[in-house]
Image (cartoon, grey):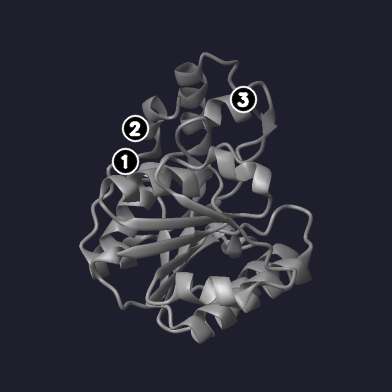
């Protein structure tokens, strides 16, 4: 199967490597030509800036009958229109090219401002700038069909150890649930979806077992050999992302049901 990954960064590179071993024909884009050297061997890399004019004569054959995976992140600088424009252009390109399927990596950050257990039907706090940005991005890509959105919890995996990022820091909400996800489970989910196309809908991906933030980051510090984070207060009930919908619909099993079990696989 032909798979095109748009925005092939930390997560995309792991996905590319696995898909190549599975025999898929994989294309991957970066915004800068200098970044193409970091793509795994066997990848057909190409430069693509979706906020600039694109060469449709080159892109159309590449995207035709392909599963297109959008791994573009909105970043932290809230450049809203750049992100939305990029995703709108991608949806248009996929439509013109006659792509087979679009899979979008979104974020459970879309539930910012909510408390308690949340699932894909939760009413969103659209007054929050980041929530609005993520929602508009999802809507932009869903202009192409079939499109499936994966709302990913906090990412962890090779080179991305939570114990290193939080070492010695002051953190809030000690007794709130943690919502994390190892890259291995994202890759497993995508591999499952490749055999289920066409498919659509919006789905959360997050380790299903509940672990409190203070317990998780204490274990993360020990695993990484770092100074534990300090918690300023117990906090309220926090937010727990319910990811059962994907499990039910696609008969998916998490490798790491508990986020703490994934810590040993983040070096």
Label 3 residue SS: loop
Q: Where residue 146 appears, x then y in whole percent?
A: 40, 81
Label 1 residue SS: loop
Q: Residues within 10 Å of mark 1 (few under 14, many from 20)?
A: some
> Is the N terminus in the top left, top right, bottom left or bottom right quadrant?
bottom left
Q: Which residue is mark 3?
A: 229
Which of the marked residues, 3 or 2, is nearer the chain's N terminus? 3
Q: In screen coordinates, is 247 left or right of 44?
A: left
Residue at 59% of width from left, 64% of height from top?
A: 110
CA–CA distance in space, label 3 to label 2: 19 Å
Which of the marked residues, 2 or 1, is nearer the chain's N terminus? 1
Q: Where residue 26 appears, x then y in whole percent?
A: 40, 56
Q: Which residue is mark 2?
A: 261
CB of mark 2 within 8 Å of CB of mark 1? yes
**Between marks 3 and 2 in the image, the one whose residue lies nearer the viewer:** 2
Residue 224, placed above or below residue 129: above
Q: In screen coordinates, is 166 left or right of 102?
A: right
Q: Where residue 101 appears, x then y in whole percent?
A: 39, 75
CB of mark 3 within 8 Å of CB of mark 2? no
Q: Residues within 10 Å of mark 2 (few under 14, many from 20)?
A: some
Residue 133, placed above or below residue 74: below
CA–CA distance in space, label 2 to label 1: 6 Å
**Between marks 3 and 1 in the image, the one whose residue lies nearer the viewer:** 1
Q: Which residue is mark 1?
A: 256
Nearer-the-camera pick, 249 or 87: 87
Where is residue 21, by image quadrant? top left
Residue at 26% of width from left, 52% of height from top?
A: 23
Q: Residues within 10 Å of mark 3 (few under 14, many from 20)?
A: many
Q: Is residue 139 visible?
A: no
């Amino acid at each position: 199967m032909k798979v095109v990954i748009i925005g092939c960064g930390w997560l995309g590179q792991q996905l590319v490597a696995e898909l190549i071993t599975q025999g898929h024909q994989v294309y991957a884009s970066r915004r800068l030509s200098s970044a193409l050297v970091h793509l795994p061997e066997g990848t057909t890399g190409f430069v693509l800036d979706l906020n600039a004019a694109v060469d449709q004569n080159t892109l159309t054959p590449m995207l035709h009958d392909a599963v297109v995976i959008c791994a573009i992140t909105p970043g932290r600088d809230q450049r809203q229109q750049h992100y939305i424009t990029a995703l709108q252009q991608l949806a248009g390109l996929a439509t013109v090219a006659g792509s087979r399927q679009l899979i979008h990596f979104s974020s459970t950050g879309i539930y910012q401002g909510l408390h308690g257990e949340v699932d894909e039907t939760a009413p969103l706090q659209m007054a929050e700038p980041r929530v609005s940005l993520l929602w508009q991005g999802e809507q932009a890509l869903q202009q192409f069909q079939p499109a499936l959105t994966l709302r990913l919890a906090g990412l962890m995996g090779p080179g991305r150890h939570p114990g290193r990022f939080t070492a010695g820091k002051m953190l809030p909400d000690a007794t709130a649930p943690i919502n994390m996800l190892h890259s291995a489970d994202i890759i497993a989910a995508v591999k499952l979806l490749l055999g289920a196309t066409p498919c659509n809908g919006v789905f959360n991906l997050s380790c299903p077992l509940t672990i409190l933030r203070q317990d998780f980051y204490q274990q993360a510090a020990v695993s990484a050999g770092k100074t534990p984070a300090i918690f300023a207060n117990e906090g309220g009930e926090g937010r727990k992302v319910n990811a059962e919908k994907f499990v039910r619909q696609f008969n998916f099993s998490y490798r790491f049901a508990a986020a703490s079990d994934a810590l040993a696989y983040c070096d």
